[in-house]
Amino acid sequence: MRIGVVGPGNVVRRNYVPCLAGMEDVSLGYFGRTRGKAESLAADFGGQVFGSLEALMRWDPDAVFVLTRETDRLGAARALLKLNPRRLFFEKPLVARHGYEDVREEDFSDAKSLLQDADRRDCETAMVFNYRFFDHSLLARQIIVTRSFGKVVNITGLVHYACWSHAIDLVNHFGSPIVELTALASDNERGERMVARDVTVAFRNVDDATGTLIGTGALDWEFPLFELTLNFEGGRIHLRDLDGDMEVLDGSSGEQVVHSIPRDRSRWDQYNASFAKSTTAYLESIRQDQPPPVPGLAGLLELQVEAAIKRSISKRRPVDLAAELPLGP
């Protein structure tokens, strides 16, 4: 299997290439604006360096990982689509021309256009959204599928902005896509590493579940960076941080269980391992000729919510996502 890597920066070196290079059936090809970084990756992990996207695509990769900075991702993806790739795999957010801390409505519009172009060219798209691959996220999904919990009826979350896009994706992943929301922002900015106005979002999803998300940059990094509670018809799941305990309440049995990750592993162990699990699952979908575990649509849905939040705050009113920010033409 041939995998192209566009954007060979530090994130790629740390989170992607070690996993890819460790697979016996994978050959790697790199392209980056800074050729030295691509050559360094090839020297350390193996693979070929290409001088242009055209040369990379003549190599005929099975998939191309678009791992540039988020500010450059749209341009790289558009250039690749002109060369008719089979598959594109994206870092998150799918599009953020002004940076992930300043996602705008235009980013949603650009992402929608990008995925429509990919669909016209029969190019499959996929996203990383590695928080789905934390140990407790995988266990929660298994519990939801195997037990009689029924539908999600309420969701609440407190989220540091470092985890914001992932939290939105998890709400869609564990429940269903958000269809209506209203948002309020604080007057003052808060936080240290990520300074921004706090945001509170009230929403309703496709299955008529309601919920709230609070986003802030003011949570201490030593404490949990996100907490998410999923209340089902027949149970409840509380997720806490990258490596925190997960509490499960089973309404049928009355059982209350706390699942813990071994304490010799840090939140960053979970974080780093999640990339390998996400990448492995994606490559296995290619081998089995199956749809990707996280489709490109997930990236568009996340940006749709971000765009709706910005619009609700600016217009001071609720936003109907399908009516005002449709996914289709």
Image (cartoon, rainbow, N blue to C red):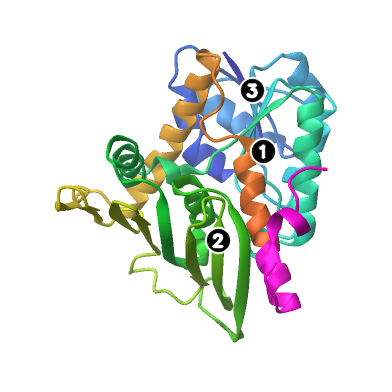
Residue at 55% across / 26% down in the picture?
43
Q: Does residue 316 appear left or right of residue 197 in this picture?
A: right
Residue at image x 31%, y 46%?
149
Q: Amino acid at mark 2?
A: Arg
Is 320 in front, or is 83? 320
Mark 1 and mark 2 lie on one chain; the one further toward the N terminus is: 1
Q: Earlier in the sequence, mark 3 or mark 2?
A: 3
Residue 95 image offset from top left, x and y in percent = 71, 49
- Closer mark to the observer between disc 1 and disc 2: 2
Mark 1 vs mark 2, CA separation in Å: 37 Å
Specify whether residue 43 is painted magenta.
no
Element type at mark 2: strand
Q: Residues within 10 Å of mark 2 (few under 14, many from 20)?
A: many
Query: Any mark on residue 7, and which?
Result: 1
Q: Quadrant of residue 310?
A: bottom right
Q: Which quadrant of the structure image shows residue 96?
A: bottom right
How far is mark 3 from mark 2, CA to CA? 36 Å
Front residue of 48 and 273: 273
Q: Is residue 101 above or below residue 47?
A: below
The reply to whether discs 1 and 2 touch (Cβ–Cβ < 8 Å) is: no
Q: Earlier in the sequence, mark 3 or mark 1?
A: 1
Q: Nearer the viewer, mark 3 or mark 2?
A: 2
3 vs 1, front mark: 3
Residue 328 is a magenta residue: yes
**According to the image, label 3 marks what residue?**
63
- Is 141 on the left-hand or right-hand side of 21? left
Q: Going 43% across and 34% down the picture, which residue do you hit?
A: 276
Q: Which mark is residue 204?
A: 2
* Residue type for callout 1: Gly
Q: In which quadrant will I find the C terminus?
A: top right
Give the magenta part as a residue range.
308-329
